[in-house]
Amino acid sequence: MSFREVDKIPARRDITTNVTSYSAHREDLIIDFKARCGYCNDIHIYRIASFEIDHFIPRVRNKKPFLSIKSDTDYSNLVYACKSCNNSKRNKWPTNDENIPNQNDKGFIDPCDKLYDQQFIRLANGQIKAITKLGDWILKELKLDKPQHEIIYNLEQLDLIIDQLKVDIENLEDINLYKRITKLLLNYRDYVQQLGTV
Ligand SMILES: [Zn+2]
């Protein structure tokens, strides 16, 4: 079992538009990151207001400007990220060399790099588990074992079941109980989705 399913792996387009602020890239990032945090793969629908933009190579390191090979609006250095991963990552960059994302099992991997998937697996209960030493470092530093990632993964699985129920119900007759359960599930999902937008 790999960490991310193929259709949930981010892929940045080669966007070179000049923008005055990196936040102008938000809509493009949402598309390229499949509406998910690059690091934990949480979908943003439940907590869209708390999704942010991370600079993969940090802008500041040890209180000094760090980015020299890229500008802070450079699309190739941006990651759509949940608040938890972005806050946990902060300005960490253990190699202290912006050209070297990781070394000796410490540091980061760009989430758009296929190597990212080789560091973790997703357990059936939704937990993210590291399977390499570098993955272990990343998991601890980004707190990928926080319960919210497991919960959001499971909510998304439930949503798929609800979608299937919605289709199934059209093909059945005299099913009041089934209808009531489906209505309840749809109401439940509406509330969860509304919560993510307030
Ligand atoms: Zn995240």
Image (cartoon, rainbow, N blue to C red):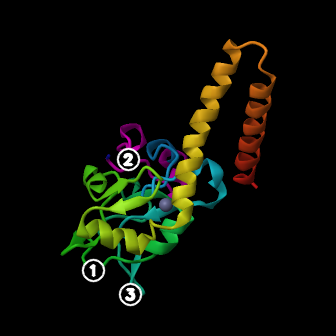
- Residue in the image at 38% along x and 87% along y: 62
Residue at the left extreme of this rendering: 104
Residues shaded magenta = 2-29
Circle 2 is placed at which residue position?
Answer: 4
- Rounded to the nearest angstrom, the CA distance separating label 3 from label 2 is 33 Å
- Residue 83 position within the rendered picture, expressed as x and y whole percent measured from the top left: 56, 65
Amino acid type, residue under disc 3 in the picture: Asn
Determine the image quadrant of residue 76: bottom left
- Residue in the image at 54% along x and 64% along y: 147
Q: Please say if 52 is above or below 10.
A: below
| Label 1 CA crowd tier, 10 Å (few <14, some 14–19, many 20+) | some
* Predominant secondary structure, magenta span: loop
Residue 96 is labelled as: 1
Q: Are marks 3 and 2 in contact (CB under 8 Å)?
A: no
Q: Are marks 3 and 1 in contact (CB under 8 Å)?
A: yes
- Rounded to the nearest angstrom, the CA distance separating label 3 from label 1 is 9 Å
